[in-house]
Amino acid sequence: MFHPDLIRHPDSCPTLVLNADYTPLSYYPLSIWPWQTAVKAVFLDRVDIVAHYEREVRSPTQTMRLPSVIALKQFVRPSQFPAFTRFNLFLRDTFACQYCGSTKRELTFDHVIPRAQGGRTTWENVVTACAPCNLKKGGRTPRQAGMPLAIEPIRPTSWHLQEHGRRFPPNYLHETWHDWLYWDVELEA
């Protein structure tokens, strides 16, 4: 019987990586490894294979189905607070302008209290803004510009960003991944 995995190039067979508690190490970016890293971890006995692709790779002495889902044997404790990066800021604000709510326009970031007025570049003072709103607000505070924020900026926890990341699945999700990524979503009646 023909299976679509059989014609896949190995490079298009990434492996979903789960922590030792069988939860993804990360949702966004999704914790995936290239097939070579996954195979190496299997041979070093650092992971358990949870699911396979039908695609095989061969050496002169062995044949192995590529792992599609693996679980680490040792638990990796995630850091409590994520790094302050542009990507993490956009993820915290769900890729939406905090002034108008737009998700379609080019996004940038804005200092709530402008740097010219003593504002600092911190989680609590920077929000995602679309270019038109950022330009409109200029060097004023939201109150001075008459532009209220949708949500007050906070320093997110890693858990907070993981929850937001679940809303933005990557372009590729192998069918063997679904049970591990969305096992806790509400079921349809």
Image (spheres, rainbow, N blue to C red):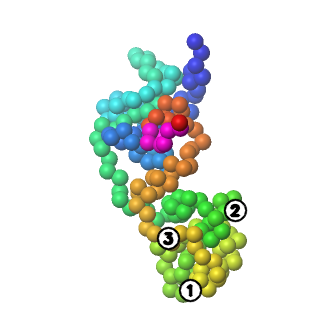
In-image side of 48 versus 37 (left or right) = left
Q: Is residue 29 visible?
A: no
**Along the line of sight, which residue is nearer the eye, 143 or 138?**
143
Q: Quadrant of residue 93?
A: bottom right
User: Dot 1 surroundings within 10 Å: few (below 14), some, or many (20 or more)?
Assistant: few
Q: Which residue is mark 3?
A: 153
Element on which disc 1 rests: helix
Which circle marks residue 105 in the picture? 2
- Mark 3 or mark 2: which comes first in sequence? 2
Closer mark to the observer between disc 2 and disc 1: 2
Residue at 55% x, 45% y is 169
**Cβ atoms at labels 3 and 2 below 8 Å apart:** no
- Mark 2 or mark 1: which comes first in sequence? 2
Element on which disc 3 rests: loop
Task: Give the answer, above or below, for where 107 lies relative to 65.
Answer: below
Which circle marks residue 116 in the picture? 1
